[in-house]
């Protein structure tokens, strides 16, 4: 029997996803929210568009409303069909459980839940105005979701324990309360006035205090911290029940805060970076807290989510061409477990090339997402090339990951002109090239396979090799500059770039890889 996919730190202390006992580089995409609600639609409109993108993993929603249309009556025909289709396509799956909460609301719950607002209590805005979000304080709602999730994981155990197509499960989606800093229902008001939970106080390293209130503990942040605790406790009830049935890795994803940075403008209480201490204290069954990165400052988000060695997973990334370059530093610098642009079925060359189709502006304004993050501008061919490169280099990547021999770089803003990477026997001057918004950014990965040899894969970068510190008396000679590919983990040289080409050491807008061999001489007498 195959082993269950699992997360574990490797010999260098980096959290790694192991699949069939081998480290796994998740080159993924997430489909649109409603695509997986129809097996026919998936077969005709989705799978054909994915071929050629070099994905090895697909993020696929499973909605509570489709698997329990009537209370106590379960129908797993859709996820069973998705498993069969994925196996035919030879692609692994990550299932996204759209249960009580999706994008800060409760729109994927079954009709029998939506209709019964007495049993399944809605969160309220100030003044008692009812929201479309079921409050995490409603125990009966959490227990109903828990029961369905347990059934779902039991189904996966029965249908996938041999083939292990499913790698992990996302619990809910972009959790939080949208439109208000906290729930103001009678249930929540009563709970907010009570002292803060002792389990929370203990997790903060404070002495037990049965009288301290949320406001005394967190001051002006109290409303959001209150929501974060109750969402995290609810998720723990749901996730732990699922793991009892089938202990796949599990994660939650975050709709990130941005300007104006006030709870409610984004889902209040979700697993944004500053809320993670509460989430980690309450939701111990969750293995990864994952950012959905639509913001332009990719590097800053990655840094926030990898503090103290925390594992990074990027379940939703921008759909514009910058994702084709961001994927390189995501793996090289931040050792991400996986990278997954959203709406991946729209990425095929046939759909995109020569088009500038924009997503619904009203929706993007509501989600506070930069419109450029959703531009369809030929991303597919670029991303396919990046994925193909990284897949071919994965053995080398895992061999050197966590050592000085592997480095990455990323242009963080338009004012940054370049960077210098210090290699074993030379400095690598990288100048960022100007490019259009329809092209990938300036980013890449560098792997030294010896002291005088390295591979550089990436985009939009001019390359110059110099002796360390570029000091007088040292001379560096480039022996060979090669184009090529990796096949079965081995380098296959194509063109040797010499003559006119040797003066043009550049990675262009199309992701590509070069190999350099050089020597450094001391020319002082």
Image: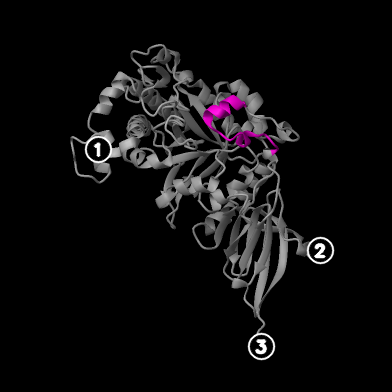
The x and y percentages for residue 432 are: 66, 55
Magenta stretch contains residue 517: no
- Residue 407 appearing in the image: yes
Corner quadrant of residue 323: top right
Residue depicted at 41% across the width and 22% down the height: 133
The x and y percentages for residue 1 are: 45, 40
Specify few, some or many for label 2: CA neighbours under 10 Å numbering under 14, 14-19, or 20 or more. Answer: few
**What residue does disc 2 label?**
500
Compared with 497, 108 (above or below) is: above
Q: CA distance from mark 2 to mark 3?
A: 32 Å
Q: Are marks 1 and 3 in contact (CB under 8 Å)?
A: no
Residue depicted at 40% across the width and 42% down the height: 274
Residue depicted at 72% across the width and 57% down the height: 506
Between disc 2 and disc 3, whose residue precedes?
A: 2
**What residue does disc 1 label?**
199
Between 438 and 288, the one lying in front of the other is: 438
**What residue does disc 3 label?**
525
Which portion, as a residue range, is magenta?
360-378
Q: Are marks 2 and 1 in contact (CB under 8 Å)?
A: no
Q: Furthest-bottom residue in view?
A: 525
- Colouring scheme applied when the structure was drawn: one colour
Kindly state the secondary structure of the residue where label 2 is placed.
helix
Kindly state the secondary structure of the residue where label 3 is placed.
loop
Kindly state the secondary structure of the residue where label 1 is placed.
helix
Q: Furthest-right residue in view?
A: 500
Between disc 2 and disc 1, whose residue precedes?
A: 1
């Amino acid at each position: 029997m195959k082993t269950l996919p699992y997360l574990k730190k490797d010999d260098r202390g980096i959290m790694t996803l192991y699949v069939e006992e081998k480290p796994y580089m998740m080159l993924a995409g997430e489909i649109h929210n409603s695509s997986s609600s129809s097996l026919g639609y998936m077969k005709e409109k989705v799978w054909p568009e994915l071929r050629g993108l070099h994905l090895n993993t697909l993020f696929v929603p499973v909605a509570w409303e489709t698997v329990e249309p009537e209370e106590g009556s379960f129908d797993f025909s859709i996820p069973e069909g998705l498993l069969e289709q994925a196996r035919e396509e030879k692609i692994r799956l990550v299932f996204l459980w759209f249960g009580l909460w999706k994008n800060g609301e409760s729109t994927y719950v079954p009709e029998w839940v939506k209709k019964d607002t007495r049993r399944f209590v809605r969160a309220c805005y100030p003044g008692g105005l009812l929201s479309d979000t079921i409050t995490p304080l409603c125990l009966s709602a959490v227990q109903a979701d828990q029961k369905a999730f347990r059934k779902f994981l039991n189904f996966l155990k029965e249908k996938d324990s041999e083939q292990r197509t499913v790698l992990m499960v996302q619990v809910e989606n972009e959790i939080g309360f949208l439109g208000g800093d906290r729930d103001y229902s009678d249930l929540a008001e009563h709970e907010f006035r009570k002292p803060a939970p002792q389990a929370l106080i203990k997790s903060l390293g404070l002495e037990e205090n049965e009288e301290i209130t949320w406001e005394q503990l967190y001051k002006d942040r109290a409303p959001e911290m209150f929501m974060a605790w109750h969402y995290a406790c609810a998720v723990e009830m749901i996730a732990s029940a699922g793991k009892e049935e089938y202990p796949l890795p599990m994660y939650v994803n975050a709709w990130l805060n941005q300007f104006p940075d006030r709870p409610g403008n984004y889902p209040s209480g979700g697993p944004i970076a500053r809320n993670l201490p509460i989430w980690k204290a309450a939701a111990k069954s969750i293995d990864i807290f994952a950012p959905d990165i639509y913001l332009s400052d990719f590097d800053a988000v990655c840094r926030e989510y990898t503090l103290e060695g925390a594992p990074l997973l990027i379940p939703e990334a921008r759909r514009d061409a910058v994702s084709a370059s961001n994927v390189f530093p995501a793996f090289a610098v931040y050792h991400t477990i996986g990278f997954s642009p959203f709406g991946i079925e729209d990425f095929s060359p046939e759909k995109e090339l020569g088009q500038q189709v924009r997503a619904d502006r009203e929706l993007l304004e509501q989600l506070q997402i930069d419109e450029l993050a959703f531009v369809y501008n030929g991303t597919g061919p670029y991303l396919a090339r990046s994925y193909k490169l990284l897949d071919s280099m994965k053995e080398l990547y895992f061999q050197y990951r966590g050592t000085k021999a592997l480095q990455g770089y990323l242009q963080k803003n338009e004012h940054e002109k370049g960077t210098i990477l210090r290699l074993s026997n030379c400095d690598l001057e990288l100048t960022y090239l100007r490019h259009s918004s329809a092209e990938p950014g300036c980013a890449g990965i560098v792997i030294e396979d010896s002291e005088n040899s390295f591979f550089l894969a990436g985009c939009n970068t001019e390359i110059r090799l110099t002796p360390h510190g570029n000091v007088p008396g040292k001379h560096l000679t480039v022996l060979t500059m090669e184009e090529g590919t990796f096949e079965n983990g081995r380098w296959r040289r194509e063109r040797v770039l010499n003559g006119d080409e040797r003066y043009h050491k550049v990675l262009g807008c199309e992701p590509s890889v070069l190999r350099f061999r050089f020597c450094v001489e001391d020319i002082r007498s």
